[in-house]
């Protein structure tokens, strides 16, 4: 066997062959199943995009209708899962609540074996349908309120905002939210997708696959960055303070949240679309002072760090969009998870197609033949 050079973080090492998505980090191109993200963001919906990602082709009108109807039918969560969620501490992070709730679905619908296509379809529908309900339920239950039941008259995104805010959203709000889900649905083999693939390769159930990916997404270097972007903009506080703040970060070698990407060395195409969506919301519902700060920061970072290929990533503007939609900051990452479930499921399905359990190697750097020292002789 050829021994490859060790690369921390597996940077640049192919871990799989996949036809789900493609990124050209130099040109700022993202495609799902060959279709440019800009096209999907303007012409598709999240559920249609999820179908495309998971089954490889755009659905026909009838296929899409059947898929949407099945998902609508499965939105409710069992009382026993709600009862379990009621016991979660109200101070707990919603990502931890989501990870535990996603894993709990496995208690009801688990199957550990190479699954039949009908089981794959059921799991896809259940997860896409129930994850948003669980995110919205925890938001209300942690304040001691009862969760809002899904509204069968509303589509996927409008229903989520309704369950979250307890009122029917404006059509622009649900459209913008739906585009956000499409933008976050898939992004090649990032950390959480890799985690999903590794878990999937053991042939455990899809609920364990998603729970493991949710846990990985929760970290601040991955999905958690958009929360940190808002804290950073609040800390900066004014347009005048942007450049002094940036200088201070550079001196301390601190990372600027919402900038930089392992793959993109230009502005992330999703950041450009999100910025446009934010502007649509500000035009209709009033501006946000943090947007001015964000624009100045983007300019300043580009001047100082552009030569290193550090530009705005997807998380830089998504937080501003979610704030305008009335979504609490600590739900930003769970919303990323609602969207990314589509990509994780696509990789689960692909992994099952030609499965081989992941078992990489390591370079051992420890000692050998070390003598065991009895405890009373240790100093
Ligand atoms: N601010 C300042 N400098 C940065 C930043 C940043 N946000 N990102 C990278 N750099 C610098 C870094 O200091 C290093 O400089 P040098 O070569 O002089 O030591 C160089 O760029 C390479 O950085 P790295 O950390 O080795 O790059 P990476 O590919 O390992 O990290 C990253 C990618 C996303 C973890 C990193 O850019 C980062 O921590 N960004 C801030 C957090 C963030 O916004 N995360 C969301 C990522 S996008 C969503 C997703 O795909 O999950």
Image (cartoon, rainbow, N blue to C red):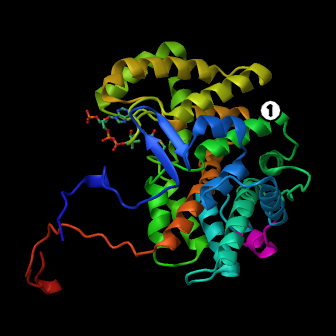
Secondary structure of the residue carrying tag 1 is: helix
Q: Residue at x 53, y 54 (%)?
A: 20
Is residue 379 at least partly visible in the picture?
yes
Q: Quadrant of residue 307?
A: top left
- In percent of width and height, residue 377 lies at 10, 83
- In percent of width and height, residue 17 lies at 41, 60
- In percent of width and height, residue 42 lies at 69, 34
Ligand 1, seen in the image, is in the quarter at top left
Q: Which residue is mark 1?
A: 172
Query: Which residue extends farthest right?
Result: 153
Q: Residue at x 51, y 72 (%)?
A: 353
- In percent of width and height, residue 345 lies at 59, 63
**Range covered by the magenta-colored residues:** 76-85
Q: Is residue 302 left or right of residue 7?
A: right
- For this rendering, which residue is in front, 61 or 120? 61
Name above or below for residue 78 compared with residue 12. Answer: below
Q: Residue at x 35, y 29 (%)?
A: 309
- For this rendering, which residue is in front, 34 or 221? 34
């Amino acid at each position: 066997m050829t021994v490859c050079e060790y690369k921390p973080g597996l940077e640049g090492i192919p871990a799989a062959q996949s036809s789900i998505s493609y990124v050209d980090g130099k040109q700022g191109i993202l495609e799902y199943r060959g279709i440019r993200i800009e096209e999907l963001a303007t012409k598709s919906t999240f559920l249609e995009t999820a179908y495309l990602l998971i089954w490889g082709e755009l659905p026909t009108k009838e296929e899409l209708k059947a898929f949407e109807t099945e998902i609508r039918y499965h939105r409710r969560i069992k009382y026993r899962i709600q009862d379990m969620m009621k016991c979660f501490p109200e101070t707990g992070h919603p990502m931890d609540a989501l990870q535990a709730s996603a894993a709990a679905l496995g208690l009801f619908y688990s199957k550990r074996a190479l699954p039949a296509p009908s089981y794959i379809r059921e799991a896809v529908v259940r997860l896409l349908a129930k994850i948003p309900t669980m995110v919205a339920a925890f938001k209300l239950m942690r304040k001691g309120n009862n969760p809002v039941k899904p509204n069968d008259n509303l589509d996927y995104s409008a229903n989520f905002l309704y369950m979250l805010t307890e009122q029917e959203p404006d059509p622009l709000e649900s459209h913008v939210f739906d585009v956000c889900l499409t933008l976050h649905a898939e992004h090649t083999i990032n950390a959480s997708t890799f985690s999903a693939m590794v878990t999937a390769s053991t042939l455990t159930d899809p609920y364990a696959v998603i729970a493991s990916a949710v846990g990985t997404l929760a970290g601040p270097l991955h999905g958690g960055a958009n929360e940190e972007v808002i804290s950073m903009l609040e800390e900066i506080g004014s347009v005048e303070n942007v450049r002094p703040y940036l200088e201070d970060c550079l001196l301390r070698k601190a990372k600027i949240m919402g900038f930089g990407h392992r793959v993109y060395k230009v502005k992330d195409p999703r950041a450009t679309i999100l910025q446009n969506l934010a502007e649509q919301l500000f035009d209709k519902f009033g501006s946000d002072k943090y947007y001015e700060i964000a624009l100045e920061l983007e300019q300043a970072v580009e001047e100082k760090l552009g030569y290193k290929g550090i530009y705005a990533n997807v998380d830089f503007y998504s937080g501003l969009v979610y704030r305008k939609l009335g979504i609490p900051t600590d739900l930003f990452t769970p919303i990323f998870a609602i969207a990314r479930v589509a990509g994780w499921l696509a990789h689960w399905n692909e992994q099952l197609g030609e499965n081989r359990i992941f078992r990489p190697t390591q370079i051992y750097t420890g000692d050998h033949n070390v003598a065991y020292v009895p405890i009373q002789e240790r100093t």
